[in-house]
Image (cartoon, rainbow, N blue to C red):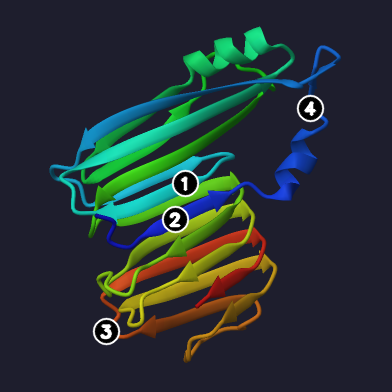
């Protein structure tokens, strides 16, 4: 049963522009190989998920489950299909607990070089866990169902990309939003401190949770 949180980090067209010209030894990275991997992890004593990807997508579902389920799609582009397959098979998906945090990330093998790596995550996790997600290049979209608990704990950060948050009807959280190059737009009535075009600092409802949305180059929308 899906209970509400859907987070997607979509690779933007800028990624294609940045990576299309990558070459190794004079050969363009025209060959690719994709494989899938599934893991589960215990959330005993865990209060937060820390999900990181350089380029890729993250789908996160809050559900009535007792452990974290992770499905990873790993894609590598290289000069040859054999090289792409070799590297993709050696990429490791790691679920590493540290205190009350469970980190989820992909680890590149030694000798990866300049070949291109995409990792798409589909994660099912118990409702109520705080979420921290970050990416280098990609958009972040977080969507909450109307019956999601109002005390949201979300920390989303991207270097190049847009962030969109669609929250439940009532949110109870301290809100901090910032963009260096871009704009901030919202459909919600807010009393803010700061420049609405660049940053927002305010409280929603009883301010029980915390929402932090940051992008270096990109726009942020809250609805």
Q: Earlier in the sequence, mark 4 or mark 2?
A: 2
Residue that carries the numbered disc 1 in the rendered image: 58
Residue at point 40%, 25% (across, down) = 37
Q: CA distance from mark 1 to mark 2?
A: 6 Å
Residue that carries the numbered disc 3 in the rendered image: 206
Mark 4 vs mark 3: in front: 4
Q: At numbered mark 3, what does the secondary structure look like: helix, strand or loop?
A: loop
Q: At numbered mark 4, what does the secondary structure look like: helix, strand or loop?
A: loop
Q: Are marks 1 and 2 in contact (CB under 8 Å)?
A: yes
Mark 1 vs mark 4: in front: 1
Q: CA distance from mark 4 to mark 3?
A: 49 Å
Q: Residues within 10 Å of mark 4 (few under 14, many from 20)?
A: some
Residue 32 lies, in percent from the top left, at 66, 21
Residue at point 25%, 55% (across, down) = 129
> In the image, is 127 to the left or to the right of 113?
left
Q: Earlier in the sequence, mark 4 or mark 3?
A: 4
Check the image and report above or below for 58 versus 110.
Answer: below
Q: Earlier in the sequence, mark 1 or mark 4?
A: 4
Check the image and report above or below for 88 versus 139.
Answer: above
- Compare residues 79 and 3 and report the one nearer the observer: 3
- Compare residues 211 and 194 and report the one nearer the observer: 211
Q: Residues within 10 Å of mark 2 (few under 14, many from 20)?
A: many
Q: If the image is split into quadrants, where does the N terminus sit?
A: bottom left
Residue that carries the numbered disc 4 in the rendered image: 22
Residue at point 50%, 78% (across, down) = 223
Residue that carries the numbered disc 2 in the rendered image: 7
Q: CA distance from mark 3 to mark 2?
A: 24 Å
Which numbered circle lies on residue 165?
none
């Amino acid at each position: 049963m899906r209970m509400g949180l859907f987070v997607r980090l979509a690779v933007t067209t800028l990624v294609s522009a940045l990576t299309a010209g990558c070459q190794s030894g004079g050969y363009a990275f025209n060959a690719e190989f994709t494989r899938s991997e599934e893991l589960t992890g215990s959330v005993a004593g865990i209060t937060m998920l820390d999900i990181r990807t350089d380029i890729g997508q993250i789908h996160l579902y809050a559900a009535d489950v007792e452990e974290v389920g992770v499905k990873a799609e790993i894609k590598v582009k290289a000069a040859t299909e054999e090289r792409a397959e070799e590297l993709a098979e050696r990429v490791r998906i790691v679920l590493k607990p540290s205190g009350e945090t469970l980190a989820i990330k992909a680890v590149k093998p030694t000798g990866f070089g300049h070949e291109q790596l995409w990792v798409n995550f589909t994660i099912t996790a118990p409702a109520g866990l705080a979420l921290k997600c970050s990416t280098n290049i990609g958009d972040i979209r977080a969507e909450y169902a109307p019956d999601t608990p109002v005390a949201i704990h979300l920390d989303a950060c991207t270097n190049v990309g847009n962030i969109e948050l669609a929250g439940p009807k009532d949110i109870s959280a301290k809100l901090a939003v910032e963009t260096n190059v871009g704009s901030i737009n919202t459909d919600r009535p807010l009393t803010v401190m700061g420049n609405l075009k660049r940053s927002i600092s305010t409280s929603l409802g009883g301010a029980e949770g915390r929402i932090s949305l940051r992008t270096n180059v990109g726009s942020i929308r809250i609805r």
